[in-house]
Amino acid sequence: MRLYLPLVCLALLHTIVDTSALLVSPLWDRITVECRLAGLSLVGVMLAHSMPTSLAQGVFGFLRERKRLRWLMFAGPVLAVVCLTAVGGVAAEGRVAWLSALFIVGGVSVGAFHPEAAVRAGTLLPGNRTRGLSIFMLGGSLGLSLGPLLSGYVVQRWDLEGLLYLMPGLLIAIPVLYWGTTRGEPVGNPGKEPGEAGKARGLREMFDGRIGLALALLLVCSCRLVPNMGMSKVMSFTLADRGFDERTVGLVQSLFLVSASGGMTLMALLFPAGWERRFMVACPLLGLPLLALWGWNGCPTWLLIGVLVPTGLVLWGTTPTMVSYAQQLFPRGAGVASAMTMGLAWGVGGLIEAPFTTYFQDLSKPQLAVWAFLPFLIVASIGAMFLPKAGGEAE
């Protein structure tokens, strides 16, 4: 129980961070209209929303290996909440530059939180790293499902400016949860001092000289995450075209992400240690027919919504395996490995999907973007077959 208290507090802090990150999720169609976005301007705003989080995770993951940055587990959530609850008012005024600036600062804050928090989560249950990471990521997944639900509700009731009403409650919870994360240390304080004998390590040393393998893993994970990054936007545009308001769009997106939380719960309770790579091979293939339904323009709405549950379970609920696999593959650079699979890979996935999503949205056929995502899942599955076994992987 001594180790579960800080882990639960860490997971709930993750909930707040990812709630903030996904507040914009059901609002993409509304923001596109209010800010008159299309083509390159829409791609630019999408990338301002997704890329800073990912790049920041890479930077802070590297810095974490040189010096411990626990204070980011407090400062990151605070800045994220302040910036990302303010985007509604700015979007309502059509101020694209300020909207992008808030996305960038808020995204960097979200990204800064994750590497230190993920490494700590991975060491709190020394006997089962994947379980600890699954609980941590379950907290994030709950936040991802809460974000669209809350923003859809407040925007429907108080318009875009209503996002600001969420700020006080989220800010009050942060110091309490941060205090909880400091209760107890992992056995032997693993990772307490980055580097060996306090000496800072370079990237080559963190990756045990296997830079090429790290880049291959980044490519596999990025391809795996292309649909994860694109689905919230595709859902927002598609459901808006079918006459759904922001509140309903938020509810549907929350259904998708609640199913992801269910998948992570199953991973935390039932996942057999050492099967990470097998899941990285199988799950993208299982997701192919599910996503193919979303690419069907004539698919009835009830089926579109219904298929989101298994899609969330298979494609989002199993993502902790990537983080656990990376930490086991590169134990000397666990912070960078976490940043790569929880941050950089998501950013590269977003960089890939944004032009496809924008192109088909400009054609008024946003569903067809999903067909462009399918080849990347195939590449991810085939690529994972050629990755080496990590420490503790089952024969």
Image: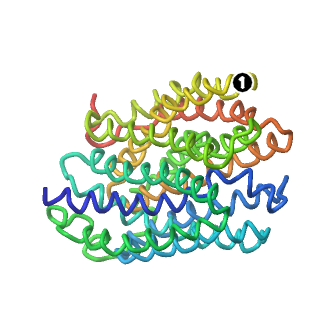
Report how many numbered discs are placed on residues in the image. 1
Q: Which residue extends farthest front?
A: 157
Q: Residue at x 32, y 33 (%)?
A: 275
Can you identify the residue that label 1 sits on? 296
Instruction: Using the rendered view, name the quadrant where residue 64 is placed.
Output: bottom left
Q: Is residue 25 left or right of residue 199?
A: right
Return the residue nearer the eye: 354 or 203: 354
SS class of the residue under badge 1? Answer: loop
The image shows residue 83 at horizontal and vertical percentages of: 58, 73
Instruction: Using the rendered view, name the quadrant where residue 154 is placed.
Output: bottom right
Pointer 1 local density, CA inside 10 Å: few below 14, some 14–19, many at least 20: some
Colouring method of the image: rainbow
The image shows residue 310 at horizontal and vertical percentages of: 48, 28
Return the residue nearer the eye: 374 or 358: 358
- In the image, residue 182 sits, relative to residue 222, either above or below, namely below
The image shows residue 183 at horizontal and vertical percentages of: 19, 69
Q: Residue at x 74, y 66 (%)?
A: 92
Q: Residue at x 26, y 33 (%)?
A: 270
Which amino acid lies under the numbered mark 1 shown in the image of this protein? Trp
Q: Is residue 95 left or right of residue 11?
A: right
Return the residue nearer the eye: 100 or 204: 100
The image shows residue 393 at horizontal and vertical percentages of: 29, 36
Q: Is residue 48 left or right of residue 67?
A: right
Position of the N terminus, as image quadrant, is bottom left
Return the residue nearer the eye: 152 or 124: 152
Position of the C terminus, as image quadrant, is top left
